[in-house]
Image: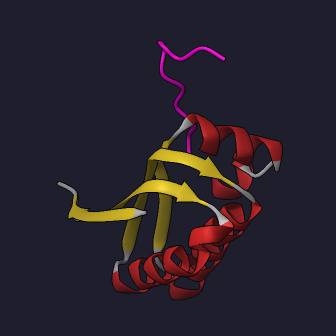
Amino acid sequence: MEFSTQTTIDGATRLTVDGDLTIYHAAEIKERLIDGVRASPVLELDLSHVGQIDSAGVQLLALAKRESRTQGHAFAIVGHSLAVREVIEFFNMVAYFGDPLVIPANERR
């Protein structure tokens, strides 16, 4: 599991996750997400490099969204891998997160 952080042109903090959002990495992911939400008034989460996500990963994303609301901060998922899109759609949470799901033209199911 790898994380990288950068500041975008508009001043948001972008946290990129490279690996799996699964129960096996839940403690590490939770710590990074909550720290990111608390430290930045605008956190963008790039999940375009996530290979697998399970229900624990979805719960962590929901926790980060809820914590950002509590802090009065903005939280957005700006990149969705195929695995992330499928799981978010399966759990019917697209509206909860409220982020546009961009599907690349060259991607086939």
The quarter in which the C terminus is drawn is top right
The prevailing secondary structure element of the residues shown in magenta is: loop
Measuring from the top left, give residue 10's x and y in whole percent: 22, 57
Q: Residue at image x 46%, y 54%?
A: 19
Q: Is residue 70 left or right of residue 76?
A: right
* Pick the front one: 37 or 59: 59
| Residue 59 position (above or below residue 18) | below
Most distant residue in the right direction: 91
Measuring from the top left, give residue 44's x and y in whole percent: 40, 60
* Pick the front one: 33 or 27: 27
**Magenta residues, start to end:** 98-109
- The count of marks equals 0
* Pick the front one: 79 or 71: 79
The quarter in which the N terminus is drawn is bottom left
Q: Residue at image x 62%, y 66%?
A: 61
Measuring from the top left, give residue 78's x and y in whole percent: 44, 48
Among the 4 quarters of the image, the one containing residue 17: bottom left
Q: Residue at image x 76%, y 52%?
A: 93
Measuring from the top left, give residue 99's x and y in whole percent: 57, 48
Q: Residue at image x 37%, y 77%?
A: 41
Q: Residue 99 in magenta? A: yes
| Residue 71 position (above or below residue 101) | below
Most distant residue in the front direction: 24
| Residue 54 position (above or below residue 86) | below
Most distant residue in the left direction: 9
Among the 4 quarters of the image, the one containing residue 6: bottom left
Q: Is residue 17 left or right of residue 92?
A: left
Q: Residue 22 in magenta? A: no
Say whether residue 13 is visible.
no
Say whether residue 94 is visible.
yes
